């Protein structure tokens, strides 16, 4: 039974990220939101594209206004109006100025902006009552970015800010990694789908839906293979299908020590190398992690396939996904960093308890209040089979192995979940 951090490190070492040449597709800019950039991008334009004003005011020669004050104001002739999108036609000479608006192009001869709040205009003349600093409120060409230099590095997720940068650089075709394909299957003869009528002794397979939603939220493509009964032949066929078509496979159930838990045996029969059989976490002790070498049936799958056998209990399945599968998917997707779960320090509003035998996770909600993270424990039973009070969870309070109690108000480690992937 591996400690959680050791299991996490081992799993991340097993992940082979998507290839920066073979696993790339080009998308138009509006379709690239949320995708992982596969190659460095450079722009062909300086930014700003030209010297421009950062404020509404008057474009002046600093030499004309450097001594002005309320007691000794300076009056200049306005020779031009420069609205946004207009190319100035005049050169500013001594004693002259141009009315200019925010973002407008600086006229030749001017090197400083005087903001309009420090002026008084009368017709074609304006009086200035305060000396600006040299170059005040001028944004110079290439001040923020010089054409040809690196603009965005590979391995980052494209969000609104990056899309805006690419649009400004007129990069409308973007190389991104394809979405990782993740096959999902549930094991157990007692399981039925949400569409079926529940019979005595049966259980609705919530894991298929939850895991598909989690996979999609990471930016990967879920491939739902449905429910597989506790029949070794059927399970072997489905797992073989999964590893032939996916980059990563997730099954739930069948990885404990019960009479009908066949997953580990079938993985070995199919040629998998099993690296993890159990982890010292609660909930989620029965966790299988294995790798398959590429089968050759699909020419796109030229890397090993990572297999996660998660516990069947609904809460255990979600906790082990957040703790171990999600970091693996982040690395697999082509992200260059920020794979691991996000832990923050905070305080709990309630007393937290565990048996201390394993690293324990208690679910609830965390809020940032006055600069400090505050954890609120979900009400009701914290059984791994109680899916109901997991609703609206955004965090897990972690109690280390050997620790049985944390009093209300004491500092704790909190794992944030259900966050956007960055």
Image: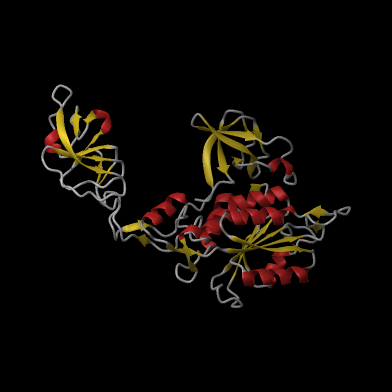
**Displayed quadrant of residue 129:** top left
Left or right: 312 with respect to 178? right
Provide residue 13's location: percent of width, then percent of height.
51, 60
What is the total number of numbered labels drawn onto the structure image? 0
- Which residue: 61% across, 77% down? 297
Residue 189 sits above or below residue 361 on the image: below
Provide residue 226's location: percent of width, then percent of height.
73, 63
- Which residue: 23% across, 46% down? 106
Q: Let me know if residue 311 appears in the view.
A: no
**Displayed quadrant of residue 410:** top right
Left or right: 301 with respect to 285? left
> 48 and 357: which one is in front?
48
Residue 217 sits above or below residue 176 on the image: above
> 345 and 70: which one is in front?
70
- Which residue: 14% across, 33% down? 66
Provide residue 237's location: percent of width, then percent of height.
73, 72
**Displayed quadrant of residue 189:** bottom right
């Amino acid at each position: 039974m591996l400690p959680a951090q050791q299991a996490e490190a081992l799993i991340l070492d097993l992940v082979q990220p998507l290839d920066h040449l073979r696993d790339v597709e080009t998308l138009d800019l509006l379709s690239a939101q949320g995708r992982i950039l596969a190659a460095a991008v450079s722009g062909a334009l300086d930014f700003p594209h030209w010297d421009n004003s950062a404020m509404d005011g008057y474009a002046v020669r600093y030499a004309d206004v450097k001594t002005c004050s309320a007691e000794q104001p300076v009056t200049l002739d306005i020779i031009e109006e420069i609205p946004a999108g207009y190319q100035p036609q005049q050169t500013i000479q001594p004693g002259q100025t141009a009315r200019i608006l925010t973002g407008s192009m600086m006229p030749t001869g001017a090197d400083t902006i005087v903001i309009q709040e420090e002026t008084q205009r009368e017709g074609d003349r304006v009086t200035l009552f305060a000396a600006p600093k040299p170059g005040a409120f001028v944004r110079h060409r290439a001040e923020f970015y010089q054409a040809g230099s690196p603009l965005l590095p590979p391995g980052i997720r494209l969000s609104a800010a990056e899309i805006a940068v690419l649009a400004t650089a007129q990069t409308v075709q973007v190389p991104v990694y394809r979405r990782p394909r993740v096959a999902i299957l549930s094991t157990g003869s007692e399981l039925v789908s949400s569409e079926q009528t529940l019979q005595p002794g049966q259980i609705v397979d919530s894991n298929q839906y939850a895991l598909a939603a989690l996979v999609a939220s990471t930016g990967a493509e879920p491939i739902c293979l449905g429910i597989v009964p506790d029949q070794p032949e059927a399970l072997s066929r489905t797992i073989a299908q999964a590893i032939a078509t996916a980059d990563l496979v997730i099954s739930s159930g069948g990885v404990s020590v019960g009479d009908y838990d066949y997953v580990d045996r079938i993985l070995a029969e199919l040629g998998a190398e099993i690296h993890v059989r159990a982890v010292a976490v609660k909930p989620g002790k029965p966790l299988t992690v294995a790798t398959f070498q590429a089968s050759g049936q699909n020419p796109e799958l030229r890397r090993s396939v990572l297999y996660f056998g998660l516990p069947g209990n609904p809460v255990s399945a979600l906790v082990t996904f957040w703790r171990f599968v999600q970091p693996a998917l982040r690395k697999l997707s082509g992200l260059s960093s920020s794979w691991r779960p996000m832990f923050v320090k905070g305080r709990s509003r309630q007393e937290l308890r565990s048996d201390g035998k394993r690293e324990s996770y208690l679910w609830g909600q965390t809020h940032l209040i006055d600069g400090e993270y505050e954890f609120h424990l979900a009400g009701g039973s914290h059984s791994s089979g109680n899916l109901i009070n997991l609703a609206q969870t955004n965090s897990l309070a972690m109690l280390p192995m050997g620790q049985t109690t944390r009093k209300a108000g004491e500092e704790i480690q909190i794992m944030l979940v259900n966050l956007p992937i960055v």
